[in-house]
Image: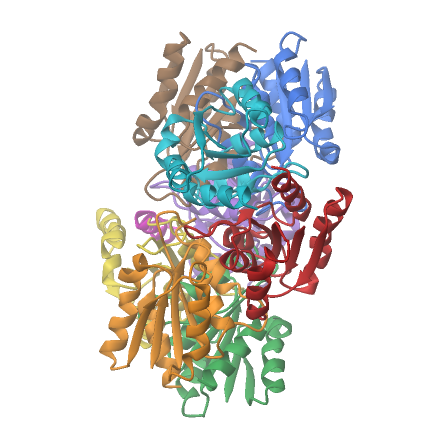
Chain colours: A blue, B brown, C purple, D yellow, E green, F orange, G red, H cyan
Amino acid sequence: HVGIVMGSKSDMPAMEKAAAELSERGILHEVRVMSAHRDPEMVAEYAKNARMRGLRVIIAGAGLSAALPGVVAAHTDLPVIGVPLTSKTSIAGGLDALLSISQMPPGVPVACVGVDNARNAAVLAARILNA
Amino acid sequence: HVGIVMGSKSDMPAMEKAAAELSERGILHEVRVMSAHRDPEMVAEYAKNARMRGLRVIIAGAGLSAALPGVVAAHTDLPVIGVPLTSKTSIAGGLDALLSISQMPPGVPVACVGVDNARNAAVLAARILNA
Amino acid sequence: HVGIVMGSKSDMPAMEKAAAELSERGILHEVRVMSAHRDPEMVAEYAKNARMRGLRVIIAGAGLSAALPGVVAAHTDLPVIGVPLTSKTSIAGGLDALLSISQMPPGVPVACVGVDNARNAAVLAARILNA
Amino acid sequence: HVGIVMGSKSDMPAMEKAAAELSERGILHEVRVMSAHRDPEMVAEYAKNARMRGLRVIIAGAGLSAALPGVVAAHTDLPVIGVPLTSKTSIAGGLDALLSISQMPPGVPVACVGVDNARNAAVLAARILNA
Amino acid sequence: HVGIVMGSKSDMPAMEKAAAELSERGILHEVRVMSAHRDPEMVAEYAKNARMRGLRVIIAGAGLSAALPGVVAAHTDLPVIGVPLTSKTSIAGGLDALLSISQMPPGVPVACVGVDNARNAAVLAARILNA
Amino acid sequence: HVGIVMGSKSDMPAMEKAAAELSERGILHEVRVMSAHRDPEMVAEYAKNARMRGLRVIIAGAGLSAALPGVVAAHTDLPVIGVPLTSKTSIAGGLDALLSISQMPPGVPVACVGVDNARNAAVLAARILNA
Amino acid sequence: HVGIVMGSKSDMPAMEKAAAELSERGILHEVRVMSAHRDPEMVAEYAKNARMRGLRVIIAGAGLSAALPGVVAAHTDLPVIGVPLTSKTSIAGGLDALLSISQMPPGVPVACVGVDNARNAAVLAARILNA
Amino acid sequence: HVGIVMGSKSDMPAMEKAAAELSERGILHEVRVMSAHRDPEMVAEYAKNARMRGLRVIIAGAGLSAALPGVVAAHTDLPVIGVPLTSKTSIAGGLDALLSISQMPPGVPVACVGVDNARNAAVLAARILNA
């Protein structure tokens, strides 16, 4: 199944669209709130145990410096899909999160989708499960 | 196996790194040059037949308006990884291609990686194959 | 006459201004909704048959990665005018669509006008018809 | 035939590609250097007389604040194609010229092509002549 | 005295702040609406006659491609102050107008102030008159 | 006469063009190196005494956060012209300095010219002296 | 204790969050409004006397060209934390202030936090006091 | 003493300037290479033990998505200074790293300095130690 994580409860309205899309496609999923910066241990544990717990794809949404997708990807070898989210203090409509999520260093990729486009993250997860 | 496509022969040096990474990991792949704008039929055919031909992931690199990854994703339901490439006339170091590839409309996602980061596209493809 | 196409019904309010301007000038036109990414065949057919059906200019509006104008231009040798549109998830006020539409690869130009400026697309179409 | 104008002699290497493309297609053209800011009268005269002199399309290349295409378009009702050019003091790889040329006010459109992409301006001119 | 020009009536609320500031300082001024692109002759005449008519500084406000300040500066040797204005279709909060006004070519400067900051244009005009 | 100040000796090659232009026009000027951040007292003194010493315009060049023009303008009521300069660590080709110099708060304007365009600062100074 | 300064009364709602965070942590602080551009002497005095008055960290919030943090840092050797603030005329969601505050010249650093993120400035101040 | 960490050996030339500045000031320091994404455990351990090992400030340099400073800050309550670094595939001259480092979420601040400005990070560290 698919894990959906986000950095803050305030990301829920945006990220729920990923859950809704997966539900519609009959794909099992779970939703967790955990911050790369405030709960780093929890994120590391979640990512490390993900494959063992039966997850096959992780969708991670985050705004601003948006480290969550990358930190998850650092602790698992499952494919990680990153959703850049906007917030009240975003630069240039979410460009900050978009760059943070896409411009990953060599060896630890994140699959970045469009700003606030959690639904597309779910569609991409479905494509991956069905590859 | 994995398909690697790019919009122009001049993209080869950047995109070869994806092929090299896949080779190193023992993952079969093929490399094709085809432009979304100059060879639209070829791209459509390639994407439509990809699953049938045994491809499981497609990596598409393109610069500037960088339509190739999205056009490929429009014609297949396989996961498509997009690599934004820089060129001599890029805006802001490849921001144009990065936005074109990541900001996809609802329902047709592309997994965008970092600018000129074809190697990460290959690592992501490996993660997907191994999901 | 002039063809007006757009990627989504939600683009209609912005694109209707092109139709209104053409009407005011007594220039025949037609309006179609078709997505480069969700209806790629329909777009290809529309563009390929455009000249034969008597179209002389095509105006294409799209937001975000905004591939529609370029895909239309790939399938016809008529002049194609692209209108970058804003949406709720635009980067930097529509910069994403503006770059996607203007930064076309060699050989397949799109005539890009200003963000959300469908009226100017119609004026440009009139100039072309009257050239 | 087609008029090619540019704001400075230093723009010639970039803009010659438009002339070369038109030559290859057997399309008559003329090349002029005139600055919107330093030779405003000459630009106004050129644009006003263009149709009478038999021009059907004008290609105007300019960098930085890049007013030339818009000023030409203000003095003629022929279609004007603008080519944003880079220079040593460009912002963000020519973003300044790209915005100046594309973001025209209501009623006076310029057909903007990609940064330094004079060849595409010529291809667009050919499409217009053949519309 | 000081001339205040703007490209459109819709710029009046923003530009009135310049007039108010000058009034408060007891500096004579006049306000005109004229578009660089729609009324190019009027702008040229206004700028050419400005010194003769007793103007010593011209403040020009414009949005989007914002050619007005530069076109005025091309037709007079008086100091010209440019005010970049935002509009509903501005890129990045007025970055388009800011770049168009500031990035002038060699020999024809415009004194650019902040976005929508017409009051500062008036203060700068007062400094110039008092230099 | 005209004062030319800059934040660092490394700005001299760019700023010398202002001095050369003023020399060519027979306008007296002086050149000083003083940093808003490293020599704040010197900058304040220079600006405060400028009018008394017979200066009528001050040209200030600076890169990066480019505070010098604004700090000078804070300590004098003479017109201050700011020249945004590029350096090895500029963002987006000098966008940082351009924004810092142009986006001044209410009441303390700086006349911003184009990036690295010290010559235009001198031309603007000449226009001001001749207003 | 900690000094909190800001360029304008209108910055108070944003900057109060720093005071609230410090209060919650039991850290003494004072709040002052003073503009780098309109009250340069007051800012210089405040910064110069800060250490003597017992301050150990200064938090400075400012928008637009945002010189305040840098000017404070120029007059003290205490650590200065800068908070980029948005305003109605910000470029790209506060990018102007963010660049002005972070891109300081060699030798005079400012510790820049996120846009409108005064609370984080207070947390950083607490970390510094507790280092 | 001060810890200097960076994400990759290739960051050494840029980050050595921090070490040199600290040496010149007689401040003890250590230098480590560890990637937030490739060595997450090592980074977590380093940050968690930092205070116990006698570190009082940590300087972290990173490019692209630049997660290292934030991840360090997540595992320690010491002040963390982030240095955005440019690389061959930076967007807009390092804007990506600058946004990733500065736009931290509530509660976990990083003190961001200018792009490639490791020396200023060291000066800031000295100010903090001397606060």
Q: Is residue A62 left or right of E109 when viewed as pictured?
A: right
Q: Is residue D81 left or right of G63 when viewed as pictured?
A: left
x, y percent for residue G32: 68, 61
Outermost residue toward the bottom in this view: E53
Indicate yes or no whether the magenta region holds residue E54: no
Quadrant in which the C terminus of chain A is drawn: top right
Q: Is residue C29 left or right of D74 when viewed as pictured?
A: right
x, y percent for residue F20: 24, 71
x, y percent for residue A25: 70, 19
User: Quadrant location of residue F69?
Assistant: bottom left
User: Quadrant location of residue A96?
Assistant: top right
Indicate yes or no whether the magenta region holds residue D121: yes
Along the viewing direction, whichever of D52 and D32 lies nearer the viewer: D32
Q: Say how many tags the image has.
A: 0
Along the viewing direction, whichever of D113 and H105 lies nearer the viewer: H105
x, y percent for residue B58: 47, 20
| Above or below: residue G72 compared with residue A18 | below
Along the viewing direction, whichever of F54 and C116 lies nearer the viewer: F54
For the question of whether residue D3 can be seen, the reply is no
Residue at image coords 37%, 75%:
F124
| Above or below: residue C98 compared with residue F100 | above
For the question of whether residue G68 can be seen, the reply is yes
| Above or below: residue G103 compared with residue E30 | above
User: Quadrant location of residue E123?
Assistant: bottom right
- Please state the extent of the stretch shown in magenta in the rendering: D117-131
Quadrant in which the N terminus of chain A is drawn: top right
Q: Main secondary structure of the magenta part?
A: helix
